[in-house]
Image (tube, helix red, strand yellow):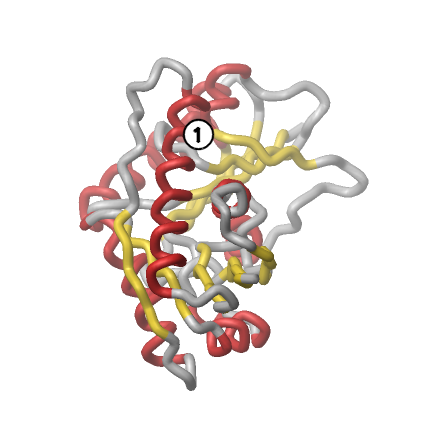
Amino acid sequence: MIELSLVGIGSGNPEHLTLEAIRVLEEADLILLPRKGDEKTELADLRRDIVADILKTKPKVVEFDYPVRDAKTPKYLDGVNTWHDALAEIWTGLIEEHGSSSAKVALMVWGDPSLYDSTLRIAERVATKGISLNTRVVPGITSLQMLTAAHAIPLNTLGAPVQITTGRQLRDHGWPEGVDTLAVMLDGECSFQHVLDVPATIYWGGYVGMPQEILRAGSLAGICEEIIDTRAKARADNGWIMDIYLLRRTA
């Protein structure tokens, strides 16, 4: 049986690797290393640096290119599922080509595999393709943890719930009823500008955990345009951006 370890590597700082993550990567027979296009070479480079500089042993590393998701598919989830199927085919082919029937295979996952990441769903698809597979998760520090730490704020207010959502949900459905704190991920369109009628504080971060980390905090209505401009400039300067933010209702 193949052991597939999905290893959370945190949000851009190699010092946030756990001892368990390092051990599992060092024990791997094969590490699959994704590349996501020229605009995100820093992400692939971080994974390469972990193997080269942190691991005492040097497992076999096989790099692969991510297929491009068709953003024009009428139904968003249909496009995502097709994309996941394509990735599962790639993983299956690489495992069969480069690993034995009892290989320990590892993938380094940005943040943590459980929080808005698709690797667990892709692993489920691989398990249906005739490979005897046991999947394990090694948790990592998430971008949400990095955001709250960088701003030195608690995630929740006293006794109150928190909702983790996406930019798409915020744009399409507005601020959810009964929730004072929203953690918003996967937002490439600055969807907070659609809820300016809600009195709120925003805690925004780009590249959290990385050397080029950018932070902004303040009244949502007051710094909305500043964040939009800062984000656009950072994306232009770096060729890509990963960001996250927390919205909290104010009295």
- In terms of depth relative to the viewer, which is nearer, 159 or 243? 243
What residue lies at 69% left-to-right and 43% top-to-bottom? 156
Q: How many marks?
A: 1
- Would you identify the image quadrant in which residue 224 lies? top left
Q: Is residue 251 left or right of residue 80?
A: right
Furthest toward the right, the residue is 159
* Residue 204 in the image, given as x and y percentages of width and height: 45, 43
The residue sitting at 52% across, 67% down in the picture is 102
User: Is 15 drawn above or below residue 144 in the view shown?
Assistant: below
Q: Quadrant of residue 175?
A: top right
Q: Position of residue 40 (x, y in %)?
A: 26, 51
Label 1 sits on what residue type?
Asn
Is the N terminus in the top left, top right, bottom left or bottom right quadrant?
bottom right
Up/down of 38 relative to 69, above or below: below
Q: Residue 236, how many percent across, how many down?
A: 19, 43
For label 1, the residue is 81
Q: Nearer the viewer, residue 86 or 47?
A: 86
Query: Quick check: 163 above or below 123?
Result: above
Q: Is residue 8 left or right of residue 78?
A: right
Residue 207 horizontal side relative to residue 121, left or right: left
State the residue at coordinates (34%, 47%).
90
Q: Horizontal and vertical percent for residue 21? A: 54, 70
Q: Helix, strand or loop at disc 1?
A: helix
